[in-house]
Amino acid sequence: MPQEPHPASPQPAPEARGFDRRSLLRSTAAGGLALFGGVGHAGQARAAAPATTPAHGPTAAAPATRAAASTPGELFAAWQANPGDHPQIPDVSHAGYRGGAPIPDVPTVVRAADHGAVPDGTTDNTDAIQRAIIAAADAGGGAVALAAGDYRCDGFLRLNRSGVVLRGEGQDRTRIVFTRSLEEILGPNLEDGKSQWCWSGGLIWIGPTDTFDSRLQLLDWAGQPVDMAQNQTNSWEQWRGGGDGEGSRLARVVGDPPRGTATVKVDTTAQLIAGRHALMTWRSRGAEGDFGLLKRLGAHPLMRDGYDWPTADRMYAPATPRFRWPVRIASLTAEHVALAQPLRIGVTAAELDTDFQTMGQVITESGVEHLTIVTAGAHDPAEGHLTDRGANGIFFNRVIDCWARDIAIEQAENGVLFSCAKSVTVERFAVRSELKVHHFTAVRSFSADILQQDFTLDAPRVWHGINHEWLASGCVWSRGHLAHGTFDSHRGLPFDNVRTEITLERNDGQVGGAPYAGPRNGRRIAHWNVENRGTSGTAVFQPDMLTHGALVGMRGPRDDRCADAMVCGDKNVVEVGTGAVPEPANLHAAQRALRLDVPPLERAAVVEALRRVADHWIATHPEPGSNEWHNATYHSGNVALFRLTEDARYLDHSLRWAEHHGWGLNGGVETRFADNHAAGDVYLDLHEIDPAPNRLAAIEASLHRMTYTDRPEKNDDWWWTDALHMAMPPLARLGALRDDPAYWAKMYALYDHTKRRERGPGLYSYRHELWFRDGNYLPGGIASPGGRDVLWSRGNGWAMMAHAKVLRALPADEEHVVEYGWNLEGVSRALRDVQRADGFWNVSLRDPDHFGGRETSGTAMHLYGLAYGVRTGRLDRDTYLPVVTRAWNALVRDAIREDGLLGWVQGVGYEPESSQPVTATTTSDFAVGAVLLAGTEVAALAS
């Protein structure tokens, strides 16, 4: 069976669960948090014992956790009432690129081939691709396109100017094959004889120009060459704050703004700029001396008073004089700064010196997407720990608002590394190796608000796993699967981080870190909806590992022993919902939905709006009309409304239409044209309600001819995406009704041609996870005025409805159901990322300036597929219910007039330019049908 090339995609979600959306969606959360800066990796000391052994500090049982709430829902409601300052649950709703915004699809400005890149697997392309990166930056930013093939690189690649994206054609088509490690390219990177390439650097290195000199010598804060034979990574990785390490003070915070507030008073705002980032810094002073801030992050009195703080000598001055946290300034007055997200560390002037400083150089708006990275290969694990040579994937260092998506990393020692990174999204990614992986991902050194989602790790041996350390905060790991590895912390008081909706097959990794890095974890670490199928609960379900943290919906073994690098005892960790999937199932998605203030769905209101639309259409269009695709789509929705309401008026209206046409097809039974088969889908609906004779004669005769007698080998009839909706559902349903899989085989043969072969590559874009309407819009064909690919909203809407209807019709074990499901999920991801703030989708999905504005028909079609996916559990409820709700509320608010007229409809066409302008009164029958179909699915969700 053909399989989709999305190894990082999560498995289908379980059946939809009954969480109370009213409580979830009623309020607006205050926003994210964040604070400290970052220092080196705590891995220079020997790592702790494997999670499968009892060698984690004292073996006495730690005290049981306390339950501040009896259910996950109650705990979430308590967080909702106090999102910025809840004692155990952090607010991570701002995690990711631009606070969780959709990743942009930037236009291609440079093709690597034009700069000499040759994807033949043998030519060294390092210089050619680097020239293309420079050219893209010189052009003002944009994507560097890497065509399909294998790009050998004997060096490493640097994205060292903002706005540049390295883009392939998909994980299965474009590969960058690195033949050497960082040690071979740049030399050893050592401290006390141990390789620091174990946690820093990448063969794709995203960081500013002041990282290296012209000879590719690493430079420290002061611009001096780093001694690669003996250095600490914090000498060159850190936020550089104007170039001197401490930065130039722009303003001092005055007063005592508490944790969770987003407005602070300062002594001056003269040097601050709204919309820009500044570096907030905190330094301990007062009675606690150098340890004051560290003790705050340790949170519980057992940690504050019982930990041996002087041993953590790299966590305070002079090694780490200040905690550093980049934050965007939303607005300014003469004395106050409004931040784009709330504080994670409050200010007490008597104890903390807090200020705003200059940022120094950073990289923004850059990324890597749609490709596979192959490294020179992890070395033999027998060589021991901390001996990596730097066969690393991607390194984000001193970056803000960057991303990686749809990537695979193969044979790497370390997959994705972050140091002094802020607001980065890495999604739909996989790390695979035949040897050992050191770090799957590591979030280090003052990194904040990193979002990693939809990921898989598959390797036979993993030293660590999902790592956080060194004052990293506000970070999220969501929807992941680990074949090996654990929830690692390399000490350094990481705080306010969340791991949610993750499955571990074995939990056999190790935690690491050295005593100079201090405690294992800081306050408010939450593990939410985690399934551990291994035999050890260490680090995953180990209450003593946390302080003021949360363990919610944990399934699998529990470790009640005292944790190393923590003070043993009850540290106010809440545990609820053990043994079951919690509601909400994904803490990050639920928090983000609240921050976006998505109002709840009400079934009665949904049905009332549908009746208004249907009644207005029937009143203004009493005659049967044609049996062509557009009117057939209307009647498909009208019959769905009858099923929902059992109001015979709607059924009678569609019966009169079918009888008027004698249950026949436009073009007769000999037609192969997909548009003409759309009426058959409605006839099948009506036959299900009343299987009277001859209702299916025409549609069955036509599809039987295509399947059995009329050139059954011909599979190129569906040359446009709309055809999927017009003809796939009747084929799927007829095969089920007659118990004849030949119809399903024919359907798939036609579908496969459309998807993968039409005009050569097929109409489905694995890069965009969207469909081109027809071959005229494939890359190299018609583009938008802005130079972007034209991915027409309604064309993708037809595909969404087709997949939903087919999945509804087919048995679960049909040969291609998995592929159809994958496609629905992929398009849903893409739609989620480009939904407008008002809930609609633009007619041109990847270019908002290409006839941008609200449009109803595509929005309703997308909504139908999305709502179906959420209702059946194919789409994650916490992630996609807000998308569904925004879209439905947009239609009710802006498209459905009080008298039931449906407006903002793009008329019949085939591209964004068609039937423009779209106005509040432009309408059409197919759009009415799409809204009725979508609304019936939404009503089922609201039940």
Image (tube, rainbow, N blue to C red):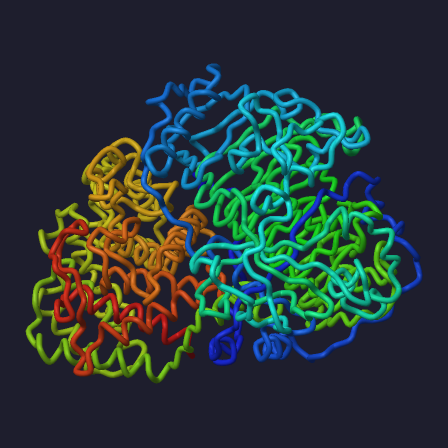
Residue 863 at x, y = what percent? Answer: 33, 64
The residue positioned 36% from the left and 21% from the top of the image is: 115
Q: Answer left or right for 470 relative to 136.
A: right
Name the image quarter holding the N terminus.
Answer: top left
Q: Answer left or right for 565 relative to 808.
A: right
Name the image quarter holding the C terminus.
Answer: bottom left
Q: Nearer the viewer, residue 540 or 265?
A: 265
Q: Is residue 262 visible?
A: yes
883 is higher (above) or lower (below) than 609 = above
536 is higher (above) or lower (below) than 524 = above
The residue positioned 15% from the left and 53% from the top of the image is: 676
Residue 250 at x, y = what percent? Answer: 54, 56
Residue 665 at x, y = what percent? Answer: 12, 57
Q: Can you name the residue that lies furthest to the top here?
A: 122
Q: Residue 197 falls in which quadrant of the image?
A: top right
Q: Is residue 586 visible?
A: no
Residue 413 at x, y = what percent? Answer: 66, 33
767 is higher (above) or lower (below) than 257 = above
Q: Answer left or right for 414 relative to 360.
A: right
Q: Nearer the viewer, residue 775 or 159?
A: 159
Q: Residue 393 falls in which quadrant of the image?
A: top right
